Image (cartoon, grey):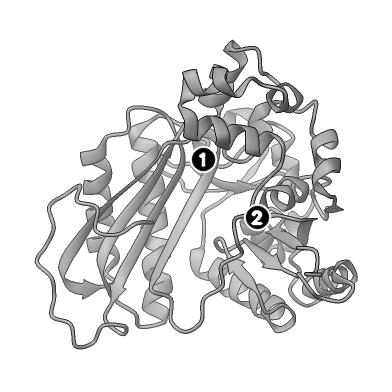
Amino acid sequence: MAPKRVIAHLDCDAFYATVELIRRPELKGKPVIVAGSGPRSVVTTASYEARKFGVGSAMPASQARRLCPTAIVIPPDFTAYREKSREVWELVRAKLDRLQSMGLDEAYADLTGVEKPLRVLRELIDDVHKRTGIQISAGVGPNRLIAKCCSDLGKPAGFVAMGREEACIRFATAPTRRLPGIGPKTAERLAELGYSTVAQLQEADESQLAARFGDRTARYLKARATFHDDSPVETEGGPAKSVSTERTFDEDVASTEELETILRTLSKELCEGLQGKSRQGRTVAIKVRLADWTTVTRARTLPDATNDTGLVTETALELLRAYAPTQPVRLLGVRLAAFDDLEPDKPPAPAAPVGQLAFSL
């Protein structure tokens, strides 16, 4: 018999804030907000002491200061965050072969076939904490969906494992928004049909869901509610064919100014990482996930490969402005692909017009 599938979601607790606290130990135990100082800046992350006041990521920094006037506000330093992230995940990869990075502070790991996987994880998390100062919360289950839901339980320093049947019961009373993939607008539309909780969605009439959302989304919603998920942990060998950075927001963002500010930050983070590896790409793309979970990509292929922050940022902003989201946004990302180190002999392609989908994110 094939071994039971064991998937873990590893999530660094308040990562950016923790990096700042390591550098500034005198701030430990105090409310800390990582955000820019401009009038349109948004919160990158916040310590748990600040989160108690309702402060969350992607929130306007001005609002965060009103909610927590005693907070210490620190400007983000993505160079430091990337260095610490590299330190953390190098330790993890030394122990776990099948790892899929989801950004600087989280990853999925496939531990199928690993002897005593929970003990391996506990020892690894303890070692990472001792050597880097970063605390990882872990969720473990038979698929990525359950692992992701479990990693949010008991934070900080959470460690929760459960099977599919237990997940169906454990999260039964939770609102449907608790399920990754169901945004506030979709949850609102489900509530209008009488499905406000995960348990109610588990028993929902699929034909009724299909009439409101379409057949494909109806099947997807039922699968999420019953915690069925067969998506793989995707590992890559050799240089990545594309590199991206993205952010999922605690609250959907409707303001164009806020979205552009966040996109500038993401583009800077992406380019600085590529500059450190001397990698340049020709295709710039954005990824926009709307409140109803509709996911849209837009891309443009440039005449020459680049990792210039200004050029990538301006291209990404033009793509976002051309798309002009008609709903609040729950996830925003930027990606660079068609790297010159993977295609050294391929002549540059002509520039594509704004809005052309050059590749799938």
Kindly identify which residue carries mark 2: 17
Q: Is residue 249 visible?
A: yes
Q: Residue at x 61, y 38 (%)?
A: 56
Residue, far left: 350
Upstream in sequence: badge 1 or badge 2: 2
Name the image quarter holding the N terminus. Answer: bottom right
**Quadrant location of the C terminus in the rendered image:** bottom left
- What residue lies at 65% left-to-right and 80% top-to-bottom? 90
- The residue under the point 59% across, 67% down is 100
Question: Relative to 214, does residue 339 appear above or below in the rendering?
Answer: below
Place of residue 275 in the rendered image (x, y in percent of width and height, measured from the top left): 36, 77
Against 359, is 317 above or below?
A: above
Q: What is the spatial separation of the Cα atoms under label 1 and label 2, in whole angstroms?
A: 14 Å
Q: Which residue does the image show at 38% across and 74% down from the upper left? A: 241
The correct choice, above or below, for 316 with respect to 128 in the image is above
Pointer 1: residues within 10 angstroms few (<14), some, or many (20+)? many
Under mark 1, the amino acid is: Ala
In this picture, residue 89 sits left or right of residue 290:
right
Determine which quarter of the picture holds residue 168.
Answer: top right
Q: Is residue 126 left or right of residue 303?
A: right
Question: Is disc 1 placed on a helix, strand or loop?
Answer: loop
Q: Which mark is residue 58?
A: 1
Front residue of 157 and 342:
342
Relative image position of residue 96 (x, y in whole percent)? 72, 77
Q: Is residue 164 above or below residue 193?
A: below
Q: Secondary structure at mark 2?
A: helix
Mark 1 against mark 2, which lies toward the viewer?
Answer: 1
Q: 135 or 218: which is nearer to us?
A: 218
Residue 282: image location, x then y, percent = 23, 70
Q: What's the amino acid at mark 2?
A: Ala
